[in-house]
Image (cartoon, helix red, strand yellow):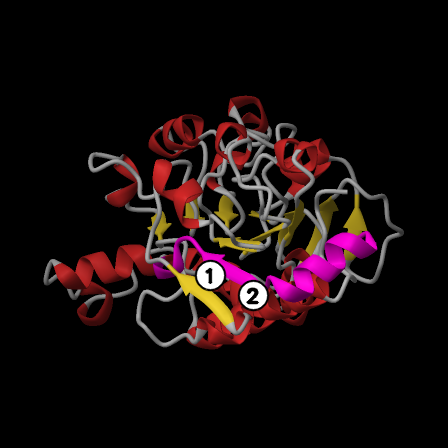
Amino acid sequence: MIPAGIKEWMMMNQRVVVLNGDKMNYDGKLDFSVLSPDTVVYDDSKGDEIVERIDGAAAVITKEMPVPAEIIQQFPDSVKLIVEAGTGYNNIDIQAAKDKGITVCNIPAYSTQRVAHTAVMLLLNLASSMRVQMAMLTKGDRRNFTDHLLVPHGEVNGKVLGIIGAGHIGREVMKIAIALGMEIVVYTRTPRPDEDHITYTDLETVLKTCDYLSIHCPLTEKTRHLIDRDAIALMKPSACIINTARGAIIDETALIEALQQHRLAGAGLDVQEVEPPVADSPLYTMEHVILTPHMGWKGLETRQRLVQIIAEDVRHFFDGDPVNVVSQ
């Protein structure tokens, strides 16, 4: 709960500053005025601009923008709330915010279906070698039509889907995968009883048994490079990796090596270790890699929902009843 004195002050000061609105509103179709009667939106903010622009603000909104300790330590005393406009909040130094008396909230479930659908889309495209088929057509190669199918085109029913992370998105992917006839093995930090078609187990078992691996855990110091050379070495050469969570959960160098050496069959990556990948990254051109620009959350309906939930986070905080707090 918020102390009474601070709550009264916030009732008078409800200025909300969005520091990098273009990250969410790149097409100009969102309305940030729902956040507060006193909302200021900047397209992007860097370095010294951040502290200057939040002077007098009560709440600050960011989207995947690094907010390190050295910046938070310079925040004016007026700032009492940071809302990270997304599920992951590894871009914000939570301890520095706590030390400064600033509450940090996230938006945990705004994009559940859209991100889950992106993961399943990548899985199904990998199963049908769609990347290879489209590349052939681009080159004028129509032999899949004129001769016979020249690329692998496998069923996913009966296959084993490995899931890392059983939060909102992971659970949604499981639901869809079961409807597709897949068996699920799950590694999660919270032990759970098995369910129909779902087995909770250790990471090694998931890696060894899965035909497809879909990542849905947050990026933390413990999960950074969770999928490294040793982890990949446990997987079947016929397996594919799908990542719609955070790029750095996978050691990208190890992944590229495994794909080049045919120790993995493919990868569907909506997130990358560096976004965008460097210009000469092999991921852009690898035949069995589907690369998308962190688009899982970017559907218009999803972004509109995001803004509405940000508004709810802000309103609850100003009312003295904060929700979705990650800085406890």
Give coordinates of residue 115: x percent, y percent: 53, 62
- Asked whether residue 301 is in view, the answer is yes
**Coordinates of residue 141 in the picture (x, y in percent):** 13, 61
Quadrant for the N terminus in the image = bottom right
Q: Which of the 4 image quadrants contains residue 69?
A: top right
* Image spot of residue 93 (x, y percent): 58, 34
Q: Is residue 21 magenta?
A: yes
- Tell me: 107 left or right of 146: right
Query: In what element is the residue under mark 1?
Result: loop
Instruction: Determine the residue positioned at 55% across, 36% down.
Output: 236
Q: Which residues are magenta?
A: 1-22
Alpha carbons under labels 1 and 2: distance apart: 8 Å
Instruction: Name the kind of residue labelled 1 in the image.
Output: Gly
Query: Dot 1, crowdedness within 10 Å: few (<14), some or many (≥20)?
Result: many
* Residue 174 at least partly seen: no
Question: Taking 201 as reference, is 315 above or below it?
Answer: below
Q: Could you say which is closer to the camera, residue 100 or residue 61?
A: 100
- Does the CB distance between marks 1 and 2 fall below 8 Å? yes
Choose top left, top right, bottom left or bottom right for residue 218.
top right
Q: Nearer the viewer, residue 46 or 74?
A: 74
Left or right of 108 in this view: 135: left
**At x 61% / y 49%, what residue is drawn?**
216
Tag 2: residue type?
Ser
Q: Nearer the viewer, residue 324 or 32?
A: 32
For the C terminus, give its image quadrant: top right
Residue indicated by mark 2:
111
